[in-house]
Amino acid sequence: MVKSVVGEETQLKSAEDRLFQSSVPAEVGLVVGKLNPDSNRGFVYDLIPTPPTDGGGPAGSLGSEVGGRDDKKKRSKGGKPSAEPSLLIDGDWVAEHARQVSRMLLGGMNVVGIYIWASEASFKATMPSILAQALRLVAQAAPWYDSEFDERLLIHISYSPRRWACRNCSLASGSLQPCDFRMGKLLASLQAFRCMYNFEIRLPIVHVGPVDSNTFRNVLFKGITYHAKDLQSAKVLIDGNLVTEDLHSISEGFHKVEFLLPFKKDMSAEGKACSSEEVSGLVVFSGSVCASAYLGPREPISQAIADLKGDIITSLRSRLDVISDEAEGEAALAANSNIEASEDASSGKPIHQLIIHELRKPCCLSFPRRVLVPWFAGIFICDYMQPSETFEDVKDRCKEMMSMEAPIEASAIVEPETAAATVTEKSFWDVTHGDIASLIDDSKNRRHLTEKAGSGKSKGSSLYFPIAIFILLVAILVGWAITFSGRKKVAP
């Protein structure tokens, strides 16, 4: 259980000043930080207000109904109810905000809870079950990679009286326990780790089993999950040095990391499927991921490595989610406006719902590219750019989702990934009908073209050999003739 929480003083004081100047009676937002279950400590880096709903209303407000659980007890005893209204929280909207923000955070940072700006009386008038439910929705929308930690933070900023309070919420029971909370300097002590990770995931496509398992999205998601298991066994180089188990500290500053995947001795689940008669094709998912992670004070190096691996897999999943969200948005727009959406003509479905082995034509899809956006104190967040988007789209999302009011210079946005990750699949139609040889046509054609390209050189070089033999024979005949004529002259 997390018992001690430290907040970044600069960011939290800035958030407090903004709230007091706004004069709003209530506000709900997200807490970005990191919780360490091994040390029972938590870090809070920033508070991000949830933007207004689609209807323009706030995500958190004060209800018109007065009283809470304590007031009901008072009324049952003949007492007067409290005049303070309780909090109303749009949990679904806050959860959607958490889902979007979690995509923009790099390794070592997560959405760790919510904060509430309200008077002490209004906070006490709100039933704890309402607060716990909001935290559950946020945890479900923004889960942590490879972690089932069952706790989130609830920070209450009271303006009457003016003070901070932090509580630890158990998602299972919904109980709220107080935490020791203080402020300090955190961001200046974070260490940055970054790597450029190249990958190639080969996914066999089977034509049996549940239809949903062979959709575009599910096939790629399964492949990314398989690759995550392989990544766990990778050897790690930090600044060119092999990481060993006894390495507990490292110099401050920026660190370059490389992952070395071992050769596979055993066939993976997808490899075994390739040898079966159920395989109808192959999808190749390849590209490069620029991954980053931030290590907090007194955390071991192994935590930075785990966060970096998690950032790679989370980034791939986030890009898949971006494509799926865009396809669903286009489908909804087409349904509302009776306009044909971008979809495969043979199936009539958005791309993430396509059954891959039913495709009748080759397909090549580019994934969004990750770009890094400066946040504060040398810390970056990220966003994903579609091929048709510009930096202006990135700026708008950062302003809306991360509440970044300061102008973002286009020159400050970093594009570490020169090429987007791509998904390529062969035409499975012929293969599904038994023409398995079509899978290797391209490789044969490439070999034929290579041989043809080199044939000019081989033909040219082969002409020299008979010419050399001819010259040699002529030289021998001439030499023999000279020798024979010379003998005749010296004969008596």
Image (cartoon, rainbow, N blue to C red):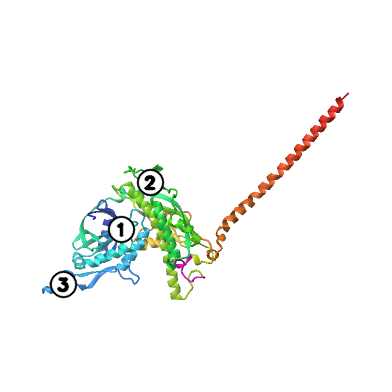
Q: CA distance from mark 1 to mark 3?
A: 36 Å
Nearest the camera: 239 or 87? Answer: 239
**Mark 3 neighbour density, 10 Å: few (under 14) some (14–19) many (20 or more):** some
Nearer the N terminus, badge 2 or badge 3? 3
Nearest the camera: 107 or 172? Answer: 172
> Magenta segment: does it hold 190?
no
Q: What percent of the width, then of the height, locates residue 420? A: 47, 57
What residue is shown with label 2? 255
Nearest the camera: 461 or 98? Answer: 461
What residue is shown with label 1? 148
Tell me what residue is drawn at x 24 percent, y 65 percent.
131
Kind of residue at badge 2? His
Q: CA distance from mark 1 to mark 2?
A: 28 Å
What residue is shown with label 3? 72
Kind of residue at badge 3? Lys
Tell me what residue is drawn at x 35 percent, y 70 percent.
54
Nearer the N terminus, badge 1 or badge 2? 1
**Mark 1 neighbour density, 10 Å: few (under 14) some (14–19) many (20 or more):** few
Nearest the camera: 94 or 392? Answer: 94
Q: What percent of the width, then of the height, locates residue 194? A: 39, 49
- Position above or below: 189 against 139: above
Q: CA distance from mark 2 to mark 3?
A: 57 Å
